[in-house]
Amino acid sequence: MNLNNKKIAIVCDWIKDWWGAELVLADIMEVFPQADIFSSIFFQEWNKVFEWRKITTSFIQKIPILNKSHKLALTLRPLAFESFDLSEYDIVISSTSAESKWVITKPECLQICYCHTPTRYFWSHTHEYLNMMEFGVFNFIGKWFAPKVFHKLRQWDFCAAQRPDYFIWNSKNTVSRINKYYRREAEVIYPWTDLSKFKFNEKKEDFYLYVWRCIPYKKFDLIVDSFNENWKKIIIVTNTDNNLYRELKAKSNKNIEWKLKISRKETLELFSRAKAFLFPPEEDFWLVPVEAMACGTPVIAYWKWWATETVLDWKTWIYFQKQTVKSLNKAIEKFENTSFNYKEIREHSQNFSKEKFQQNLLKFVEDKLNNFR
């Protein structure tokens, strides 16, 4: 099936930062170079990935304050995505962990959803989000208001999840969640990472590494508490300068080094030099540990969900069973008494290559279009 004569749109929740979901978006864009982009907001004008693309944003883009906070704009995003006119498109692909699957398409339009997870704050992590509001002095309003809004939005989210003709999940873990919450079936196509950018290094240095956004469910607090107790050296990299970051940095011992908003080049160098990468959250799919493995760096991970899908006979990862200081420090002790084959770790990362992702995604779309209607 030749897709060159098909009008294609790619829809995503928001284009604000440059992390895992945005990298997957860029991957999908590369597979479909003729596609137009739709998003609730767009703040990546500097990014060459988008420099020649047609990008359509919603009315939220023009609302000060709300356009910079996806939490504050929560109740507006369903309306924003339903307001997009996609009537001229033959294929619509949403890349989402939130509301972009809410778009409305014509009956003759093939609508595919690449789902990173059912919307966390509506389903699997509702209570965690309610307990960790980030509205400062207005937290008490959020805790009173959010449960009332979530009930209705959860119903709408389920209805919206029936709109795509087909779903693609990013991991087997996501399949189980979407079966439970949305009652939908689908195929798994793992995301990829550009492994060529990661420098393989067998000469590891005496420090651990953790990299991500400093938000509650990423378990930065568990990292800090564990290393405050074990006094081993760790470097924590984040681009998030928020209250949680400042609180955790203030309580960190001297063995914990924080690096805020450093360059990608510096981060990649740390990946190659670290003796192990920490992976403490409960994740649907996370490319960062794969990037660590591309450098030959072992991973110490929480034994749940996606982490269990990437194991190679216990030769690439060390696991801990509970998200507790005791369990994590026990895993670190086990790691320090285990030998690793760094070349084997690097080879295992090749299972998440760009070629596999693009071939599988393109084949999926072509097969579904051939059999559509």
Image (cartoon, helix red, strand yellow):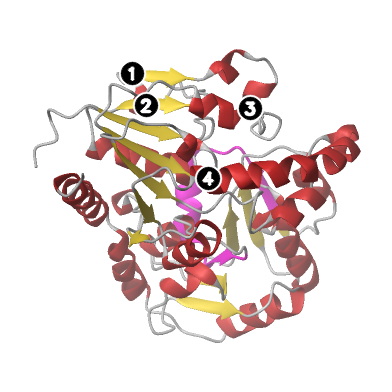
Sequence-wise, the earlier of marks 1 and 3 is 1
**Circle 2 residues within 10 Å: few <14, some 14–19, many ≥20:** many
Sequence-wise, which precedes: disc 1 or disc 4?
1
Q: Is residue 117 left or right of residue 23?
A: right
Q: Where is residue 53 in the image (x, y as percent from the top left)?
A: 31, 21
> Seen in the image, is 187 located left or right of residue 60?
left
Q: Which mark is residue 76?
A: 3
Instruction: Determine the secondary structure under disc 4.
Output: helix
Q: Is residue 303 above or below residue 237?
A: below
Q: Which residue does the numbered mark 2 point to in the structure image?
A: 37
Q: Amino acid under label 1?
A: Lys
Dot 1 surroundings within 10 Å: few (below 14), some, or many (20 or more)?
Answer: few
Give, as a three-letter code, the residue at label 4. Cys
Is residue 126 depicted above or below 24 in this figure?
below
Mark 1 = which residue? 54
Closer to us: mark 4 or mark 2?
A: 4
The amino acid on which the numbered mark 3 sits, given as a three-letter code, is: Leu
Q: Distance between the residues labelled 2 and 3?
A: 19 Å
Provide the secondary structure element on which disc 2 rests.
Answer: strand
The residue under label 4 is: 159
Span colored in magenta: 257-280
Dot placed on the residue nearer the N-terminal end, 2 or 1: 2
Q: Residue at x 44, y 22 (%)?
A: 84
Q: Of tags 1 and 4, which is closer to the observer?
A: 4
